[in-house]
Amino acid sequence: MTRSVMKSISGSILSIALCLFSATAHSMDSQGSPNEHCLERMKVGKFKDQCLDTSSKRALKVITWENDQTLSIQNFRKNGEFYQARIPLNHIEKVSYLVVDLDAKPLNKWGLINVSHTQLRLQLAPGAYIELTSSNRNNLEVLYENDFIISVNYMAPKDVPYDPVKGFDETLYGSVMQMYATSEEAKVRFLEDQVNVYEIPLRMTKEQAGSLTLQAILTSSTAQYTTPYDSWSSNCTTAVFDLIDQALELKNQKPYRFKAWIFRDTGMIPAFKALGKRGLIDPQAKLTSMNREFGYPQFPSDSNRYFKRYLGKRLQDL
């Protein structure tokens, strides 16, 4: 069978699969509570000039630079509230790549397509913290955080869920690069959604981790909600790779994009191999479960038969 025929068949299967997934009519992201007033409006596309739902997802904004290693930003999220965050870039020590199994029924029942959300987790060195100050003037408490997520998600007006079929229209949805506490991620994924999260460490220096964080802040602050979000060419996974390539100046790498023949796995094994080619995964590094780290079991999912078999495996074994 020729490669072109395989691509055609794979593309047809993907289209049918996404139609089935679309029929479930559920959102891949929590919509949050309604806005009391409109903070941002859609810039382009079908929903242009309509009010964006920014109740749970907001772009970052730079407030002040203290020096070349410390800056303050707005819209760092923790416990459902947005904070002003003072971030010491030179104290970020660990970076890992996360794969969230979205348990996309009915597709994964047959192992047809295992839809995932991908993002980055960053941890500060022991004794170093991000200082968080509430935007609520009545709340003078200062919180401290040393573990956070960088994630790219779709943006739309309230009550407009993400539809993966309509998502092939690159002008329909906007996107946002956001930053929030890993404890917030654990609450949403494990307590509310009850889905599984897989993690593999990335090989980065402190300087690279700081550059990655800074690039995420600048990208979010500059783009705001104008970058399209779609199901194929501009999504959570492609945005993470673009961020890494730009921050680390990996100019010799082709941009990571989905291919028809990887339709079964949207964010794990093909992405791991691409990260390996970039020298960012140690061949001896193993895939682990973030569920276990936070004291949660492996939740039932029809995608377990696919994702779970890679737990404890090294990149060189994939």
Image: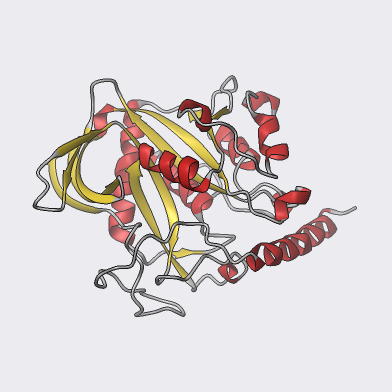
Residue at the spot x=37%, y=42% of the render?
184
Q: Position of residue 260 (x, y in %)?
A: 71, 56
How does the figure colour the protein chain or chains? secondary structure
- Please give left or right for residue 22 compared with residue 96 in the image: right
Is residue 75 among what the camera can see? no
Which image quarter: residue 209?
top left
Q: Position of residue 26 (x, y in %)?
A: 56, 63
Q: Is residue 66 above or below residue 172?
A: above
Is residue 121 among what the camera can see? yes
- Please give left or right for residue 121 compared with residue 39 in the image: right
Q: Is residue 221 above or below residue 77?
A: below
Which image quarter: residue 232?
bottom right
Q: Is residue 168 above or below residue 2?
A: below
- Nearest to the observer: residue 226 or residue 207: 226
Q: Position of residue 55 (x, y in %)?
A: 32, 61
- Nearest to the observer: residue 315 or residue 145: 145
Q: Quadrant of the C terminus?
A: top right
- Nearest to the observer: residue 194 or residue 152: 194
